[in-house]
Amino acid sequence: MACSGNRVVVDIFGREVREVCLEEGATVRDLIKALGLRVSEVVAAVNGEVVAEDEVLPPAARVKLHSVVSGG
């Protein structure tokens, strides 16, 4: 599949690895939404560093998504 934008490799909760094609300038939030996930339930590490959801994804980024666990 040809990607005219930014090709991102994403590890989804350690269960599945996918390649996703996003527009240049896409953010972590854009990626999470494109995967049908809720931003409030996910933490993302881009190229090994935990980042905020408004972080712009660099070209050919490797993203690992972790689910947020809360409780008391």
Image: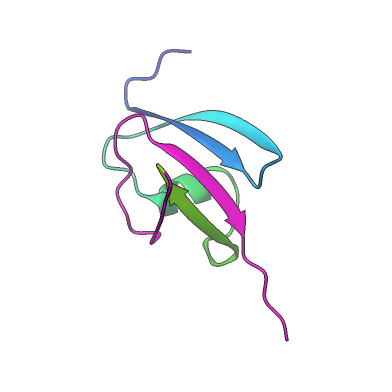
Residue placed at 27% from the left, 35% from the top? 24
* Count of marks placed on residues: 0
In which image quadrant can residue 67 be found? bottom right
> Which residue is more in the foreground, 25 or 70?
70
| Colouring convention used in this rendered image of the protein | rainbow
Q: Is residue 15 above or below residue 21?
A: below
* Identity of the residue drawn at 73% across and 86% down: 72
Query: Seen in the image, is 58 located left or right of residue 8?
Result: left
Judged from this view, the residue extending furthest toward the bottom is 72
Question: Magenta stretch: residue 69 in it?
Answer: yes
In the image, what residue occupies the spot 62% across and 65% down?
A: 68
- Residue 18 on image: x %, y %: 58, 30
Give the percent coordinates (x, y) of residue 36: 60, 48
As displayed, is residue 30 above or below residue 11? below
Q: Is residue 70 left or right of residue 54?
A: right
| Magenta span dominant secondary structure | loop
Which residue is situated farthest in the front direction here?
Answer: 48
Which residue ends up furthest to the top in the rendered image?
A: 1
Q: Nearer the viewer, residue 38 or 66?
A: 66
In the image, farthest residue toward the left: 25
| 59 in magenta | yes
In the image, residue 34 above or below residue 44 = above
Q: For the magenta stretch, what is the residue range?
A: 48-72
Query: Considering depth in this image, is 53 or 47 the residue closer to the camera?
Result: 47
Q: Position of residue 63 (x, y in %)?
A: 47, 42
Q: Which residue appears at 48% of the width and 54% of the height?
A: 44
Along the line of sight, which residue is nearer the eye, 69 or 27? 69
